[in-house]
Amino acid sequence: MNEAAIIPQSEIEVWKLPSRGIVGMACLILAEAAIFIIFVVAYLFYVGKSLSGPTPQDVLSLPIFTSICLLSSSITVHLAVNALHKGARSLCSLWLAATVLLGGIFLAGTGMEWYHLIYHDGLTIRTNLFGTTFYSLVGLHATHVIIGLFMLSLALFFSLRGQLGGSKHTERLEVISLYWHFVDAVWIVVFLVVYVFGR
């Protein structure tokens, strides 16, 4: 007798393929992580080798408030995904709005820092090796923040219109949240390398 006929149907495990979106985002994150590693290594290699000023000690201050805002946004995006899982669309919209706001504050803080560095301290991408590696690394991260904010803003727009719901949209929001968690995790590395160890 066939063994499959003996096993009750309720005990047969159905193998489910992993989400294509999550697998795709995981692959993208691995590729992006490799790029960030190259930029971090370049920054560490050239730090202190500039022949002229300003140096990191002269111009950089710790962006504590904006860092707290960005890292807190990982919590709010997680809460947005959880709310959507539970079907609480209004709560999802609220947490998405908080995430976009916190990310926007971080981006505005980065813009203000760059304005001060360029127009008050005279540090541009062409000033010295520090300027080149600083703007390349922090600018690469800021670009990823902009992309993440764009995706989160789209999700917020659809959520406010009542068009975000169901397992398909929940999975898509999970994919976006993975990207945002990656952006936040990268900032921890950038913060430590540039603003703590690099000074």
Image (cartoon, grey):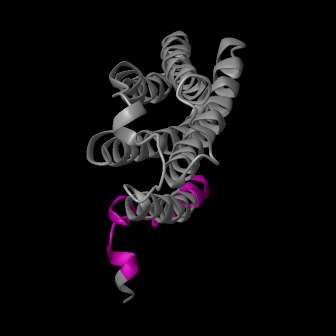
Q: Nearer the viewer, residue 149 or 124?
A: 124
List the single residue furthest toward the left.
197
- Classify 167 as above or below 113: below
Q: Nearer the viewer, residue 19 or 175?
A: 175
- Classify 133 as above or below 41: above
Is residue 11 part of the magenta span, yes or no? yes
Occupied quadrant, residue 65 = top left
Q: Which of 139 and 87 is in front in this view?
A: 139
| Span shown in magenta | 4-25
List the single residue furthest toward the bottom.
1
- Classify 6 as above or below 192: below
Relative image position of residue 7 (x, y in whole percent): 32, 72
Report the label total: 0
Is residue 142 part of the magenta span, yes or no? no
Q: Residue at image x 59%, y 25%? A: 111
Q: In which quarter of the image is the C terminus?
A: top left
Relative image position of residue 185 (x, y in whole percent): 38, 44
- Classify 5 as above or below 104: below
Q: Quadrant of the N terminus?
A: bottom left
Q: Tell whether 169 sits left or right of 42.
A: right
Occupied quadrant, residue 119 = top right
Relative image position of residue 118 (x, y in whole percent): 60, 30
Q: Residue at image x 62%, y 29%? A: 149
Q: Residue at image x 47%, y 23%? A: 80
Q: Residue at image x 42%, y 47%? A: 186
Q: Which of 9 and 141 is in front in this view?
A: 141
List the single residue furthest toward the front.
52
